[in-house]
Image (cartoon, grey):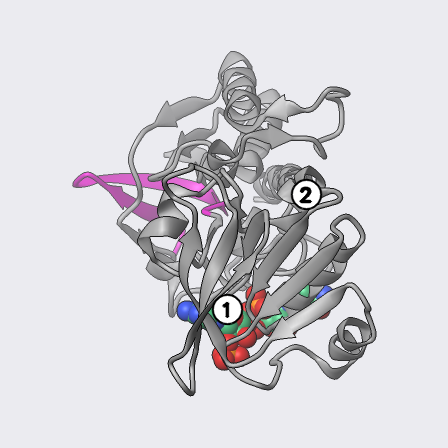
């Protein structure tokens, strides 16, 4: 029987592990399919406090892992395939084995949705990104495109307009999904243009190994046209990794776990959630780490009360 089982080895899970281990709770951390989380596919992280020269994403995660290990976290590789939260102890299944926990911290993260075209995969990290706050800085004084018409796309476009010389928002319809308040901000911004009724047919130029533009397809006429740009930001939504908890915890309609306003507790007592699996608004490494810390402190208090 374990005091604390943490699911997910990104910044939220590892920070929860550091705090739980230092509170002498002997946490077990199940790393998931992408140990280190989304930061392992980022190059320079320049917005994580404490690194005046920035830090490589994978290096930051390796250091967090080493820190969690040094203070006493036990790591298990692999991903949980099933969870039973119906009663305490909670049961997590992994590789045919069942792990029992008095408290559970879910830090399974989220995945950016991608267009799923070949050029996007080949140019990922070479001008194609899904996070303006992470990578926008590299496009100062350059031209970029943002794909999507929701709040994320518009927020990214506004953020990028402060850095880039021109931002083209590519949207598959002629009407934005984003809130009216957000729309007003973007439609008034002289640096932001729109490519309506358009989808990306291909990102150019795979042969050069860098982004030089995009080939757009008109969704109505099927007509193709090229526009030049130095970066492409995909902002067509995220999917939280919460499938195995569906029907067992309160979630919003996309699948983000609902946590209490004043703590990281979920609708099941003893189950806490941290990081991107419960946060659709901020989605930063530092906020994930912060909520991971909160979840561990909440778990410790819960165990004390038990
Ligand atoms: P949304 O699902 O709201 O929007 C996704 C956008 O991407 C839509 O415009 C959609 O087009 C488009 N899209 C989806 N799939 C494709 C595809 N394959 N090709 C081209 N375009 C595609 O996701 P968001 O991430 O924008 O927002 C998620 C939630 O988070 C929302 O509830 C939002 O309000 C919230 N949020 C709030 C913020 C804030 O308040 N500051 C900031 C960011 C997010 P279509 O419209 O045609 O479906």
Position of residue 15 relative to residue 183, above or below, is: above
Q: Which residue is mark 1?
A: 250
Identity of the residue drawn at 38% across and 81% down: 222
Q: Residue furthest left?
A: 96
Position of residue 204 relative to residue 19, above or below, is: below
Position of residue 12 relative to residue 179, above or below, is: above
Instruction: Give the quadrant of residue 262.
Output: bottom right
**Looking at the picture, how far across and down is residue 213, in whole percent?**
52, 54
**Looking at the picture, how far across and down is residue 106, in whole percent?**
48, 47
Q: Is residue 274 visible?
A: no
**Mark 2 and mark 1 residues within 8 Å of each other at the beta carbon:** no
Q: Nearer the viewer, residue 213 or 9?
A: 213
- For marks 2 and 1, the one nearer the N-term is 2
Compared across the picture, whether 219 is left or right of 130 comes to: left
Identity of the residue drawn at 64% across and 31% down: 45
Residue 301, label in figure: none
**Looking at the picture, how far across and down is residue 153, in whole percent?**
62, 65
Q: Nearer the viewer, residue 282 or 29?
A: 282
**Which contiguous range is marked in magenta?**
86-108
Compared across the picture, whether 49 is left or right of 302 comes to: right
* Secondary structure state at the residue bearing disc 2: helix
């Amino acid at each position: 029987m374990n005091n604390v089982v943490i699911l997910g080895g990104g910044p939220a899970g590892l920070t929860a592990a550091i705090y739980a281990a230092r509170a002498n709770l002997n946490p077990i951390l199940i790393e998931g399919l992408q140990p280190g989380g989304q930061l392992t596919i980022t190059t320079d992280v320049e917005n994580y406090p404490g690194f005046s020269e920035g830090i490589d994403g994978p290096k930051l995660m390796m250091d967090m892992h080493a820190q969690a290990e040094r203070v006493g976290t036990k790591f298990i590789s692999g991903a949980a395939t099933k969870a039973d939260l119906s009663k305490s102890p909670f049961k997590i299944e992994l590789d045919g084995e069942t792990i029992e926990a008095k408290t559970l911290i879910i830090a399974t993260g989220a995945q950016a949705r991608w267009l799923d075209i070949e050029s996007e995969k080949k140019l990922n990290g070479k001008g194609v990104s899904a996070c303006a706050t992470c990578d926008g800085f590299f496009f100062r004084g350059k031209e970029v495109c943002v794909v999507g018409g929701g709040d994320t796309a518009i927020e990214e476009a506004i953020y990028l307009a402060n850095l880039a010389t021109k931002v083209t928002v590519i949207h598959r319809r002629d009407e934005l999904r984003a809130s009216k308040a957000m729309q007003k901000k973007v439609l008034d911004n002289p640096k932001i243009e729109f490519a309506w009724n358009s989808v990306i047919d291909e990102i150019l130029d795979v042969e050069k190994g860098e982004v030089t533009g995009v080939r757009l397809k008109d969704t109505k006429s099927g007509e193709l046209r090229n526009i030049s740009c130095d970066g492409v930001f995909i902002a067509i939504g995220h999917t939280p990794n919460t499938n195995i908890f569906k029907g067992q915890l309160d979630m919003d309609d996309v699948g983000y776990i609902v946590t209490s306003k004043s703590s990281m507790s979920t609708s099941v007592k003893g189950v806490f959630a941290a990081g991107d699996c419960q946060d659709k608004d901020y989605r930063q490494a530092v906020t994930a780490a912060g909520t991971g810390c909160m979840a561990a402190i909440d778990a410790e208090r819960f165990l004390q009360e038990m």
